[in-house]
Amino acid sequence: MQAIYTNFYLFIMAVVLALMEIQTEGRHGWAGDLPTWRPSNQKWYVRCWRRVMNDKDLTGYHAGIFGFVFLVFHLPYVFGFPFTLSHWSQTLSLFFLFVVLWDFLWFVLNPYYPLSEFKKEHIWWHKKWLALAPTDYYSGILVSLLIQIIAAGASSSWLPLGWWLLNFGLFSLLTLVVVGISHSILDIDSWRKK
């Protein structure tokens, strides 16, 4: 039951974060119009960032927001939650799922990027796509799953994989609910036309 509560809380956190980013970036995705730090591509850390982030620009805004979310995910340990490899594997696994979820919700809830235009030609900062989604989504989900496969092997138990499937399934279900609300009730794709 705790996994369900945690999942729901993280989902609400992703919705709020996506909404906050929509208010900050609006129609200019990936901090396209924000007065933020943008280091030269010649710097070694920028090259590392671009490699990990599928050739996305490093901005102060994104370094800060990703760093903040990563720290929030580790907050339970600061408050005394036991730091074990099992717990940390769940934390990291959830972090990678969360980043994919948060990014996709940005599109679901952003009237400037209707899901009907969720395609490579409309979203300049997601440069690499596979089928219907940016490759970042697949790699984030895969890394999250691999962390739990390693945890299952280390513990000689299938429980980490069951836990991962539960979280992935709940995030997927809640995302479908928000997509339905966003388009059927809020009619978000028509907001820019009003």
Image (tube, rainbow, N blue to C red):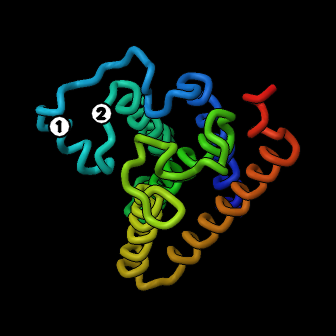
Residue 130 badge: none
Dot 2, crowdedness within 10 Å: few (<14), some or many (≥20)? many
Rendered-image quadrant of the N terminus: bottom right
Left or right: 69 with respect to 57? right
Q: Quadrant of residue 42?
A: top left
Residue type (three-letter) at the residue carrying disc 1: Tyr
Residue under label 2:
58
Please determine whether, in this image, residue 176 is positioned above or below residue 65: below
The tally of labels here is 2
What is the distance, in whole Å, between disc 2 and disc 1 at their CAs? 9 Å
Which one is in front, 137 or 119?
119
Left or right: 27 with respect to 144? right
Residue type (three-letter) at the residue carrying disc 2: Leu
Return the x and y of residue 165 as percentages of the image width and height. 59, 73
**Mark 1, secondary structure of its residue:** helix
Q: Is residue 87 visible?
A: no
Q: Nearer the viewer, mark 2 or mark 1?
A: 2
Residue at 82% across, 40% down:
187
Residue at 64% across, 53% down:
6
Return the x and y of residue 162 as percentages of the image width and height. 58, 77
Please determine whether, in this image, residue 182 is positioned above or below residue 163: above
Return the x and y of residue 114 as percentages of the image width and height. 66, 43
Residue at 19% across, 44% down:
48
Residue under label 1:
45
Rendered-image quadrant of the C terminus: top right
Left or right: 70 with respect to 194? left
- Disc with the residue nearer the chain's start (2 vs 1): 1
Labelled pair 2, 1 in contact (Cβ < 8 Å)? yes
Q: Quadrant of residue 63?
A: top left
Residue at the outermost top position: 35
Dot 1, crowdedness within 10 Å: few (<14), some or many (≥20)? few
Residue at the outermost right position: 185
